[in-house]
Image (tube, helix red, strand yellow):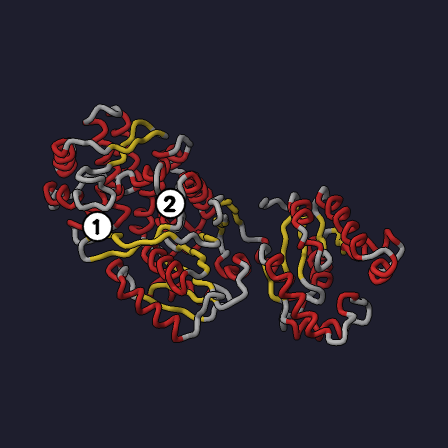
Amino acid sequence: MQNDDAQNIIFTGFMGTGKTTVGKMLAKKLGREFIDTDDLIEKRQGLTIPEIFDQLGEVAFREMEAEIAKELGQSKGLVISTGGRLMLDPANVEALSVNGRVFCLVATPQEILSRIEGDTDHHRPLLDVPNPGEQIVELLQERKKGYQRFLKMTTDEKHPGDITADLLDFMQKSQKHIAVEIPSYPHEYIVGNGILPFTRQLAGIDGMLVVITDSVAGELYAHSCGSIDHVITIPEGRQKKTLATVQAVYDELVEIGFDRSGTIMALGGSVIGDIAGFVAATYMRGVNLVQCPTSLLAMADTSIGGKNSLDLPQGKNLIGSFKQPSLVIADVATLNTLPKEELISGMAEIIKHGLLADTDLLGKVEQGTWPLKIESLHTSYSELQSLVAQSIQVKISYVQKDPFDEGIRKQLNMGHTFAHAIEKVSSNTIRHGEAVAMGIAAATDLSVRLGHCDEQLKHRIDLVLEKVGLPNRIPDTLSPESIFETMKRDKKRRAQSLRLVLPLRVGQVFVADDIDSRDVLKTLEAMSSPAG
């Protein structure tokens, strides 16, 4: 989807939802030409829509709609109101979406019937039935799946001027839409600034929307998520990523009558993403999930790919599931409330993605493109948004090739075997991103030690971690032997061997299964001593 000022703005939806009224208002506000496809067809045919249906038939009318869609799809800068069924045809959607952004206006059957009964200027052939109210309900049900693909704006009990103002507000929000093409589970990742209030519309949610969040993110953002039905709040902290927490969430969902028609929204950092994802994967054998990460770590890494995990006393992430979201919404405005340490911590995954990919991502971090000064973040949203978008595209490329983590996706674990052990030995006093930074530095040191990469890469990685404010050494208070013993219990090991991802150069890493334990210990000892 483009974010071009010259893009057409297209309205679809059922009759009586306000497409023409709102379309005309919006066109006037933007100084654009307004086109109603039904009016255009009537003008060209010299017949009203009912006359076309009576004299030429519905098939002929649909063919006229298709021709109009192809024609208007080649234009720019228009506001277009379409007939209720025009955008149910995939070919018409494809034609109009080339240079356009589609909004679906929705209203309840009762509201639609009330508006249509009061509209004496239009005759509706499809409602020439004894009970038009029942007909509206049936037609809405038939069209529900077709309308579902578009961003929805509710018009019930709203003045057209207010709807127009909401649309203008939404369109001013900068957004980047990135397709995640996973077989059977395609969805979008949307990065933007100030888009959280439009979650329901962006996700096309009709049913119950339940937010799962923690006490910090919930207090900051839950009230700004638009129309939600219920909030489940989990106390903050990784120690809550357990089966006991999941059981408590199940109980609350049952109590409020949540069923498979509803949607779970994960609002928070990586821990909340894991808990909500696991719940969505398992409650009633699976319900719809929308990920709304509010930390840089979650935006750049954990909200992508569908992996959800819980901890056991014996180790991290030992229970898990795959659950692809229907949408990921990353609102970079939420990063403004992150503590400086958490923002810096999230940069570890962006640096990792820069090392994995043969792009300019790592160079952008080195050159200070990322706003390192937390106090200036509010003036640098577009820059941060661009960096996040580029980082997530790296992970998406891996996930699309290996959605179930059976092959090349394992490269994303670079630094994580070291990191998980460091976290465990430190009793989780070290942040995940800080541990990942130590792990990346350790993996690079080990690769140099084994002759797979040169010292220059190690020096480069150490410098970029230091520049961002991340550690490139392991605290000497942590025993190398304890870290190594913990690494041997890592779930990613193969038989009795450690599985480690090591860098060769920027853009090329490999998975090693046969590393001598003495070399790993030497690296841990070197990383735990002061830099020489």
Image mark count: 2
* Closer to us: 415 or 343: 415
Residue 134 in picture, x, y percent from top left: 68, 73
Residue 383's tag is none
Extreme residue toward the right, this view: 46
In front: label 1 or label 2: 2
Q: Amino acid at mark 1?
A: Ile
Secondary structure of the residue carrying numbered label 1: loop
Q: Is the residue 322 above or below the residue 153 in the image?
A: above
| Quarter of the N terminus within the rendering | top right
Q: Amino acid at mark 2?
A: Phe
* Closer to us: 383 or 39: 39
Question: Residue at point 74% right, 71% down?
Answer: 116
Whether residue 351 can be seen here:
no
- In the figure, is residue 229 to the left or right of 431? right
Q: Residue 154, located in which quarter of the rendered image?
A: bottom right
Residue 404's tag is 2
Question: What distance separates the C-alpha of mark 1 from that of mark 2?
Answer: 29 Å
Residue 513 in picture, x, y percent from top left: 23, 34
